Image: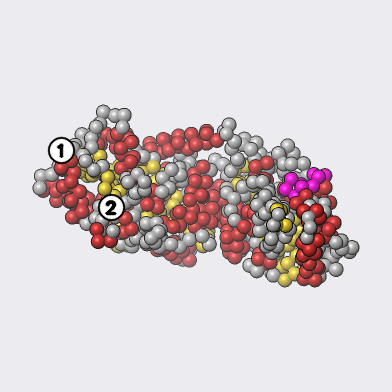
Amino acid sequence: MTDNPMEKMSVVEGSYATAHAVKVCRPNVISAYPITPQTHIVEDLSQFIADGEIDNCEFITIESEFSALSALVGASAAGARTYSSTSSQGLELMHEVVFNVSGMRLPTVMTVVNRAVSAPISIWNDHQDSISERDTGWIQLYAENSQEISDLTPLAYKVAEDKDVMLPAMVCMDGFILSHVFEPVVLLEQDLTDEYLPPYRPEHILDTKNPKTFGSFADPSVYTEFRYMQQKGMDIALKKIEKAVDEFTRIFGRDHGGLIDTYRADDAEILLMAMGSVVGTIKDVIDEARIDGIKVGLLKIRSFRPFPVEAVRKTLADAAVIVVLDKNISLGLNEGSLCTEVKSCLYNTDINTPVMGFMLGHGGRDISKGTIHMIIDKSQKVARSGIKVENEFVDVRGDLI
Amino acid sequence: MSRLAPGHRGCPGCCDAMAANFVLEAAGDDVIVVSPTGCLEVMTTPYPESAWEVPWIHSLFENTASVAAGIESALKALGRKGNTKIIGLAGDGATMDIGTLGLSGAFERGHDITYVCIDNEAYMNTGVQRSGGTPYGASTTTSPTGKKSFGNRTQKKNMPAIMAAHGAPYVTTTSISYPKDMMRKVKKAVDIEGPCYIHAHAPCSTGWRFESARTVEIGKLAVETALWPLYEMEYSEITGVKKIKNKKPVEEYLKAQGRFKHLFTREGGEKEIAKIQEIADWNVKHYGLE
């Protein structure tokens, strides 16, 4: 084997890298409904099935997203490793099942190809769809690039299926920006993935030789404990994600960070925070700003659920100003979700740093380097003279309002 | 032997319990049962108790067929399908209204499942609201009789016809008042490879308002008045019909139930009864019941 990773790279579409990653994870049941921009993933998986490249696997070409995830409830309870993928409206249609899968502690993995939600209808990227599923009890991981979406897939299975976790996981990738872009990627090797991800062997399954009841109803004397145990699973997942990252690095020799990642953050006075593909643009802008002597760095969130409170606090402790970029908004609060989480984990601590929130990139609006520079300029002023505006929309067109 | 343990919390004379017992007795031990939210789920599985001595799963209200399809696919993929039967046991609301999308999809794709609709003609678990299975003239809590209403204004949705239109190998009606008929049909359905649909008429003493000792009698009257025809269909063609020897007027069925009482006490009720008789007469002609 060569030591030069460049020689192992193929130039593939992000969707193909994802589908390939799913393939080498050896799923038993895939159930999905086509929706832009998720389609290339399920098309590639369909081709793998048609070519006999996934053993012991059934692909259900189902009639709706609602049923797609419902079928995986049955399949996962029967002991199958399960996979689905969706976007936007599809995820919203699944919503009732999304809660159900987590409550039943079924470790399904689903790629969410992030897309704005209707109305107005838009096929382009933002994070409103998966953010809207924040409280459903799914692990949520966000990828910066095609390599990361590929590598997060077996990691998601490994953590989700851990007997002390047993929670479903969404791996989120930006629609079009990642799903439809060709990048050099090291496609996951089957032998290494087998070494990394053992077969799924759940403790409780639908088995006629050992009958069990799944999905009982819970009266007020027992319901609370189900929610409490889900939160315990999330707490454990925090540690298991870090452990799964270490093992991934040991076997595959690649590292994208753990629950979080940082870039030039050690001495940063201005600390930018974001998730997903915009991180790449931010890194370029940081390099440019650093040339001008601006002490700016990045804290990238990889695990949005469970939210890495301790790691975030530790990284933010010495910054003069914290700047959060959100591709979503909680309407009525005028704030993006990551900004809310960051503020909440700083309260009741000794950290009293101003937190600025910028909501941008809605419905696929391009986030240019100029926009990031503008945000850094504003944050410098806040660092000097204090915060006046906590949250604002970015790049709003006055001519349309 | 049935695998539904006694001690569940069903009402006296409960149609769901009878239906579940007949299905389990006919289908044998090698079964996995899927149920939606509803009376059957609530009365049999208050955590941490369960009346089910076979593997059983409940997910949501409207996804019984999709969950069943997922189980079937998983067992195939894992090489564990063997002779295991996957059976959906769902009420009329879960089947004919909110769950139709997933049911249609599962039948179109041809999963090897048997789906039994236990049709008690309204949403009983939530307090007797009308469904697509509620018959003409029935008073429910959302189709009540009133100064300007004689109850439900629509006829029962012809669900067996819809299921037959999928080209399913076996679609049949039955009634919990005819256990031998029902068990024979369940056995036939689970032994056929592919999606089979059984629509079981199921009188509910609570919702229909009759004495709980009369569940079987009321179900028989529905068949004897031709308001619930018993027939079998294979690949969309009718292949078997239970003939009625001494057909009774619909009044005999209607007057036995509180949900139709207004038809006999209110002025103009006789016209409504005549309309219901027309439905029975159409059944006799259409299905060749005499």
Residue A385: mark: 1
**What's the CA distance linking mark 1 and mark 2?**
24 Å
Which residue position is annotated with label 2?
A360
Q: Does the magenta stretch include residue B262?
A: no
> Counting other residues with Cα less than 10 Å from the Cα at mark 2, is it few (<14), some (14-19), or many (20 or more)?
many
Q: What's under tag 2, amino acid-wise?
A: Leu
Report whether residue A102 is seen: yes
Q: Which residue lies furthest to the left in this view?
A: A292
Q: Which residue is drawn at 20% across and 48% down?
A: A375
Report whether residue B88 is seen: no
Q: Where is residue A225 in the image (x, y as percent from the top left)?
A: 52, 33
Residue A351: name its quadrant: top left
Q: Which chain carries label 2?
A: A
Q: In this view, does B164 lie above or below A301?
A: below
The kind of secondary structure element at disc 2 is loop
Q: Position of residue A229 (x, y in %)?
A: 49, 35
Question: Magenta segment range?
Answer: B205-213
Q: Does the magenta stretch include residue B206?
A: yes
